[in-house]
Amino acid sequence: RRVVHTPDGTIRLACDYRRPVAMVLTELPGSGRPAYVPVDKHGYRLPETYTDISGCGAWIQILGVKAKPPEVGRPFEADDAKAGVKLAAIIFQQSFHSQVAAVDVTNYRGRVSKTKSHILIHRRSKTSEAFHWGSAIGEEIEEPSASEKLRMLAKCFCPGSPQASIDFSVYSNAGIERAPDIVPKG
């Protein structure tokens, strides 16, 4: 923001640092191993790479990004990464952000299944249930707005709320409890 050169030769910088809001699970080129790279709220890749983030606090993971990570200091350009980062950045600003384990964009724009939710939010609790966010922010068609979905998500993290799989993509004032997917035996 500002550079000051003092008479004694000291240079003082006033700047803002990029702060990580999420960790993108990706595969590092050449290694073939999964790794986490931190990103800021605009999707810029920050320095460092982690193979395990279990002891690193309450980071929000972004799962299902297909694109390779950019160079440090460059933003993710892929649409699935941008959608995951945008949602993670908004969740990071909420009081309940530490209860969110991951934003899952594996089915972004229905690329795996047109009938499944495009984005899932996994909670940090031991339950395997996920919240069905729906389409990416700005891509909603006949869905509640992101602010309406966030309001409903906040209610789900209140004490005493049901530990269920809730779909936020249908009604602006209510969520639908979804039955678990049943995989036929055989």
Image (cartoon, rainbow, N blue to C red):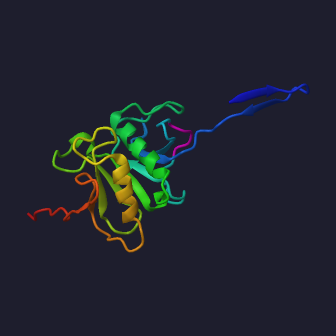
Q: Quadrant of the C terminus?
A: bottom left
Q: Is residue 22 left or right of residue 143?
A: right
Q: Is residue 28 above or below residue 152?
A: above
Residue 28 forms part of the magenta stretch: no
Q: Which residues are magenta?
A: 45-49
Q: Nearer the viewer, residue 101 or 71?
A: 101
Q: Quadrant of residue 128?
A: bottom left
Residue at image coords 24%, 40%: 109
Q: Quadrant of residue 19?
A: top right
Residue at image coords 46%, 45%: 89
The dominant secondary structure in magenta is loop
Instruction: Please state the horizontal and vertical placement of residue 185, each as a whole percent of the image.
Output: 10, 65
Q: Is residue 179 above or below residue 104?
A: below
How many numbered circles are shown?
0
Instruction: Please state the horizontal and vertical placement of residue 129, each as a whole percent of the image.
Output: 30, 64
Instruction: Please state the horizontal and vertical placement of residue 118, each as a whole percent of the image.
Output: 26, 46
Q: Is residue 114 left or right of residue 102?
A: left
Q: Nearer the viewer, residue 82 or 159?
A: 159
Q: Can residue 177 be seen from the camera position used here?
A: yes
Residue at image coords 31%, 60%: 130
